Amino acid sequence: MDTTEIKKFKYMGRIGQTFIYFLKLCRLFVFRNDWKVLPMAAVIAGMVSMVVGKGLFLTMEGTLQGAFALTCVCIWNGFFNSIQVICRERPIIKREHRAGLHMTSYVCAHLIFQMILSAIQVGITIVVCRLSGMHFPEKGLMTEGTEGFIVELFITLFLITYASDILALMISAIVRNTTAAMTVMPFMLIVQLVFAGYFSIPNMLREVTDLMISKWGTQGICALGNYNDLPAVLIWNRMKAAGNVDLGGVMTLSELMNIVEENGFRDRVQYELGKASQNANYVSTPENLMACWAHLLVFAAVFAFITVVFMEFIDRDRR
């Protein structure tokens, strides 16, 4: 920012400063090659689709694995979007703050820009998943048609990405430099993944999952994907793999399962196995999905508030 622009800052309101910084972020996105996060989002979505796409929204196990994988993709994208954006220009921000920069305007510009960037990344992710042949249900929880499901999935993935994005923005406002930011990021990513509710954790730590973006993201996708009403195929497939087990000399396990299949009872057995594996957290109701959205929105708001607080005291930072 040159001397003329600095003088203008003294007489410019918060909205004007927000607009100026938003345009600055757009320029930096192009000239600093930050646009590379967009093709990266497409590549990651493609890899996830190839690995877990076949079972997502079709089987209970496939939906849980796919929901966890999609949540990981969104958190990864969000973290990379903003983990360095503040700490890499801390000296410039200090100088501009002394010249009249409102930190609320600065942070709001980032919030708007990251909102747009997150929406584009989620759009790319859904398009890639759709082109890869991933199955999408015929309706959402609150809307009709596959298009309605896509809209609800978009909102869910966007909120996961955006909350992760603002968490990384908060970290960028707190840490000393870009090296520290890139050191903290893997640790935060591991914490999010471990406490997502996907892995078995001790009872004394289960309440920690309520503070994780990953937990509410996975729960929202599973609820949207009708997890509790899907067939469980993992147990069936393992029984098929152990088909040589002798059942008292009468027949083998494989022969018994063949009889079940020949009489058309396989699907019924798999659905009954699914009923025995239902999870109350993944109940497919609009209320459950809205609760997941609300938690993610609250996370984003809290992270944004903390970012503003740390930025307001940037002049006292002697680092």
Image: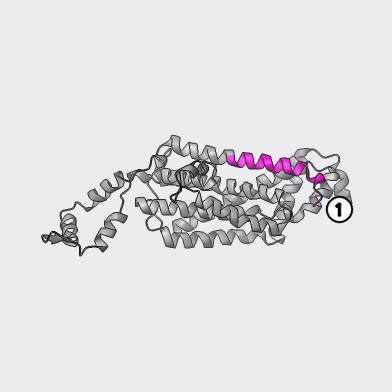
Q: Is residue 175 magenta?
A: no
Q: Is residue 140 left or right of residue 10?
A: left
Q: Is residue 222 left or right of residue 45?
A: left
Q: Is residue 139 visible?
A: yes
Q: Residue furthest bottom?
A: 244
Residue at 68% x, 62% y is 33
Q: Is residue 314 magenta?
A: yes
Could you say where residue 295 lies in the image, as x and y percent from the top left? 54, 39
Q: Is residue 173 left or right of residue 245?
A: right
Regarding mark 1 in the picture, which secondary structure is present there? loop
Q: Is residue 121 visible?
A: no
Q: Residue furthest top?
A: 287
**Within-10-Å neighbours for mark 1: few <14, some 14–19, many 20+:** few
Compared to residue 136, the image places residue 294 above or below, namely: above
Compared to residue 145, the image places residue 242 above or below, namely: below
Which residue is disc 1 drawn over? Answer: 2
Quadrant in the rendering for residue 97:
top right
For the stretch drawn in magenta, the main secondary structure is: helix
Between 163 and 280, which is closer to the camera in this rendering? 280
Could you say where residue 80 lies in the image, as x and y percent from the top left? 62, 56
Between 79 and 35, which is closer to the camera in this rendering? 79
Magenta stretch in the rendered image: 299-319
Could you say where residue 272 lies in the image, as x and y percent from the top left? 26, 46
The amino acid beneath tag 1 is Asp
